[in-house]
Image (cartoon, rainbow, N blue to C red):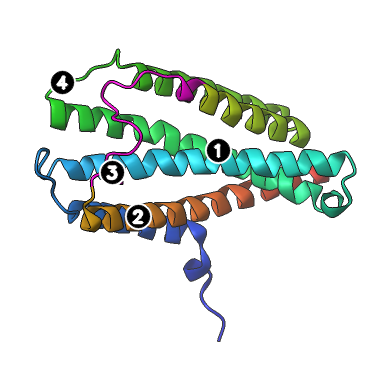
Amino acid sequence: MPMPKIIKSPLLWFVVCVIGIAVLAFFGPEEKSLGANVRIVYLHGAWVLTAEIAFIAAGLAGLAGLLGLLGLPALASRTDMFHRWSRALGWTGIFFWVTYLPLSLWAMQANWSGLFLAEPRFRLALTFAVVGVLLQVGLWLIHKPWLTSTANLAFIISLRLVFASAEYIMHPPPSPIFSSGLLNIQLFFIGLNLLTLVAAYFLTRIFLSRSAARSQLTAKN
């Protein structure tokens, strides 16, 4: 007997994953200096890492699509697929990036009893959020696959170059979790990241289906 359509829905599984992430984060291990508030830091960290991974994947998919357009034999037959994935992953990346910002503010307020909005890395994150949203909206309106792939590749390169030279103030480099030596916290954080990546996958599938529906409508018109 085939499974009901709702069970196959990526939206359903995305919601299930988000609920699972919230529950898992709520029961995360406490830390000596931050106590239970460290759970917000776990969530904030997993969210921004997932955003960056989605941006990297969007850039790589876009690069593959562009190389296919240039006639690279191994990629030429799948150029459209790579462009579609680049578009959907770009949307996923900006979703996680924008929603990570309130988590960052929450972590500031909970752990440092105030909002340090002038913090360099937060200011840069806000700038890239605004630019990223405007970029994705513009690419959606223009609807040129090669341009979307090019823009997604340029976006992640720019983001990584800018953040590589950004000053650390409230974000200890490179990773206080993995330099802590606390195995239980490290394993928990890895598990939280994996679940967040699964959520990102289902969100990308949602965007892929929306993109396919739009392409079909455009073709009919």
Task: Tell me the CA gap for discs 1 and 4.
Answer: 30 Å
Quadrant hosting residue 123: top left
Residue 191, horizontal then vertical, whole percent: 34, 58
Q: Cβ–Cβ below 8 Å for labels 3 and 2?
A: no
Q: Which residue is mark 1?
A: 55
Label 2, secondary structure: give it: helix
Indicate whether residue 62 is drawn in magenta.
no
Q: Which residue is denoted by mark 2 in the rendering?
A: 190
Who comes first in sequence, dot 1 or dot 3? 1
Residue at (36%, 18%) from the top-left corner? Answer: 167
Can you name the residue that lies furthest to the top here? 118
| Residue 29, horizontal then vertical, whole percent | 16, 53
Q: Amino acid at mark 1?
A: Phe
User: Residue 179, which numbered label?
Assistant: 3
Q: Which residue is mark 4?
A: 114
> Residues in magenta?
162-180
Callout 1 touching callout 3 (CB < 8 Å): no
Say what amino acid the circle numbered 4 marks. Answer: Gly
Q: Where residue 57 sits in the image (x, y, percent)?
A: 59, 44
For marks 3 and 2, give the CA distance: 14 Å
Using the numbered discs, state the Cα–Cα distance from disc 2 to disc 4 in whole angstroms: 28 Å
Q: Nearer the viewer, mark 3 or mark 2?
A: 3
- Marks 1 and 3, how far apart at CA: 25 Å
Q: Which is closer to the viewer, label 1 or label 2? A: 2
Q: Residue at x 57, y 23 (%)?
A: 158
Q: Amino acid at mark 3?
A: Ser
Asked whether residue 221 appears in the rendered view, the answer is no
Count neighbours of disc 2 (C-alpha within 10 A) and say few if under 14, some if 14 to 19, many if 20 or more. Answer: some
